[in-house]
Amino acid sequence: MTATSVILAATHAGVRTLTLNRPEKLNAANDDLLLTLTGELRKAESDPEVRVVVITGAGRGFCAGQDLGDVSGRGMTFTEHLNHTYNPLIRTIRGLEKPVISAVNGIAAGAGASLALSGDIRLWAQGAALTQVFSNIALIPDSGSTWFLPRAVGYQRAFELMAFAEKVTAEDALRAGLCERVFPDDSFQADVQAYAERLAARPAHALKLTKQALQAALSSTLDEALDQEAALQQLAGDSWEHAEGVTAFKEKRAPAFRRQG
């Protein structure tokens, strides 16, 4: 494991785990944490040994949102701050050519809720919770929450959660489609690693193209999505992964989607 002041980075079996490391503040975000996390994500993208990225938090919290003390009296506008820190981070996560798992181990509040929602897959601990606390200090949800949340729960429910800063439990999150799996608190780290390793064993090139197709389809017409699928399917079909998958099917064995060397 390598450590920076605010991010812990570790790689095992093709899984790069990036841990927000301000546990004494429930991993509330300052500029150092946000910029370092963005940089670590870009390093993971360029590392051929990394097939899946996991973002999680140290201690009891996932991310309690913005550390207000870090921005107090700094003279930077809200717009400047978002464009300098959160927006590049969220764009990096969504644009990364590798799957990103948000492993929500505890409270995810404010911009931390946006980070929890931004992963390609969201895994929650049983004791985790999410809350859009922005309205408590008369701000609007940012860092992608107005895009992520209504796509998961619908416009009206998203507005209600944002207006009242309601807390969403893991059970409710699973039912509402805000996460894909909920694991016990005491085995969460091991369960996330096992899940991520399963994902890392899948065809990396095909998953990259799948992510690209899904991102495009979110803002396209059906005709545009059909054209995009046809173009990307050719790229997938021309790959060694496809040849391996077909060969493995014919030979009645599990495909080997990770090349040695």
Image (tube, rainbow, N blue to C red):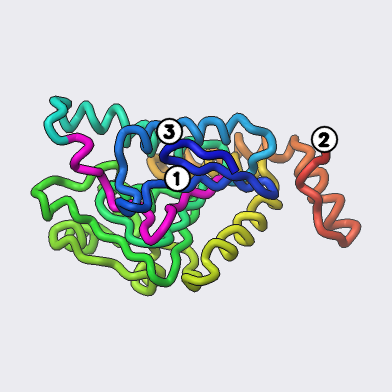
**Type of amino acid at the residue the image marks with label 3:** Thr
Residue 55 highlighted magenta (yes or no)? yes
Rounded to the nearest angstrom, the CA distance separating label 3 from label 1 is 38 Å
Cα distance, mark 3 to mark 2? 30 Å
Can residue 201 be spotted in the picture? Answer: yes
Mark 3, residue position: 36
Q: Nearer the viewer, residue 95 or 168?
A: 168
Percent coordinates x, y for residue 33 in the rendering: 37, 38
Q: Is residue 72 magenta?
A: no
Q: Residues within 10 Å of mark 3 (few under 14, many from 20)?
A: some
Say the numbered circle drawn on residue 72. Answer: none
Q: Is residue 215 above or below residue 79?
A: below
The reply to whether dot 2 and dot 1 touch (C-beta < 8 Å) is no
Q: Which residue is the site of mark 2?
A: 261
| 3 vs 2, front mark | 3
The residue sitting at the right extreme is 251
- In the rendered structure, the answer to whether residue 201 lies left or right of residue 158 reads right
- Tell which circle, 2 or 1, labels the residue nearer the N-terminal end: 1
Residue 232 in percent (x, y) is at 61, 37
Left or right of residue 199: residue 219: left
Q: SS for tag 2?
A: loop
Q: Residue at x 23, y 56 (%)?
A: 132
Q: Label 2 neighbourhood size at 10 Å, few (<14), some (14-19), many (20+)?
A: few
Compared to residue 149, the image places residue 167 above or below, namely: below
x%, y% of residue 125? 45, 67
The magenta-colored residue range is: 53-71
Q: Nearer the viewer, residue 144 or 153?
A: 144
Q: Secondary structure at mark 3?
A: helix
At label 2, which amino acid type do we have? Answer: Gly
Image quarter hosting the N terminus: top right
The residue to which callout 1 is attached is 222
